[in-house]
Image (cartoon, rainbow, N blue to C red):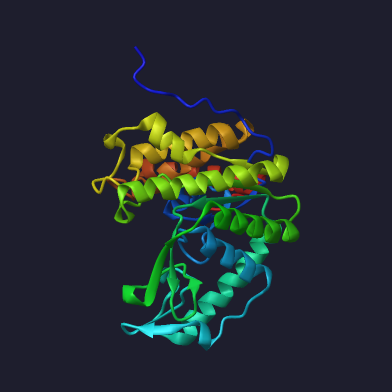
Amino acid sequence: MDFRTNINLQKEANQIDYSSKLLLIGSCFSENISAKLSYFKFNVKSNPFGILFNPIAIEHLISNASNSKIYTEKDVFQLNERWHCFDAHSDLSSSDKQKLLQNLNHAIASTIKQLQEATHIIITLGTSWVYKLIETNSVVGNCHKVPQKKFLKELLSVDEITASLENMCAFIKNANPAVTIIFTVSPVRHLKDGFVENSQSKAHLLTSIHQIVPLLGVRGLYFPSYEIMMDDLRDYRFYTNDMLHPNETAINYIWEQFQQVWIDEKTTSTMKEVDSIQKGLAHKPFNSNSEQHQEFLTDLQIKITSLKNNFNIAF
């Protein structure tokens, strides 16, 4: 008997190899995939403005980068002895206002460069629920623990999300017509919004993505990370203790599915070599001065030099 519903995935064109340049933007699940790609030493950049959950916030980042926006003092505010920006995650916040502005403008310059040079851009949408700052009537990327009375919470409609995705794709294609855009929906459950509300939110994202992807042709695709979690794994043993986030086993499984679809098979042997080196670098010897360990380090350095010379992979 088969107690699972396996999702049959097919390899896509424009696959990822060690010459690819990757940019990942979106919810915290994009951080998980980025971490896997980084471990195997692919050329990957992730979330220059930190984690962004909703499509409007991602659109703002892409449009601001495309227009080379310069952040000034009017774009930031102070709360609890730290300076913040509603466009960015608190990872960019700082106790020093000028440091925050420096972080924001460096991230904008970095983003437009990545948009122009990327071979693949992976956009992970987390939720259709947004918070609008009442004072400006604008959607924020992060509330930074500002009192909730300052915001209106709204569910984006399918039409609003579709328009936002169209805008971000237009900006991306204008900067880089040849880039492959991969959309995915985060499997993280946003149950603070409510069970029904989370389902409605994910449904709006999925509907909008599947309206956009056909319009992009071979340069726009969808990877079903949400469906793999919900319909293939489909069990609480694949969640962390909070019952909201995929655990390490689930992340590894979804990564394996992503690798099957998007990673060029020709890179497999190189990935195994990188994995061997990573494990070697993490190895804790009983006696670091032993002859055996010194031989191990020499062998490891030979492998590292070989990968650097052949694939420009740096450790």
| Residue 83 against residue 239 in the figure, above or below | below
Seen in the picture, residue 266 relative to 169 is either above or below; the reply is: above
Q: Quadrant of the N terminus?
A: top left
- Residue at 47% from the left image edge and 40% from the top image edge: 225
Depth check: give the residue in front, 251 or 244: 244
Give the image location of residue 11, x and y in percent. 61, 30
Above-or-below relation of 53 to 311: below
Residue farthest left in this picture: 241
Quarter location, residue 249: top left
Of residue 37 and residue 260, the one placed in the foreground of this image is 260
* Residue 62 shows up from this direction: yes
Query: Image point 23% across, 46% down: which residue?
Result: 241
* Residue 32 visible at all: no
The percent coordinates of residue 55 (x first, y second) are 53, 58
Outermost top residue: 1
Figure disc tally: 0
Closer to the camera in the image, 313 or 180: 180
Whole-percent x, y for residue 135 in the image? 45, 81
In the rendering, at what x and y percent does residue 141 appear?
46, 67
Left or right relative to 212: residue 294: left
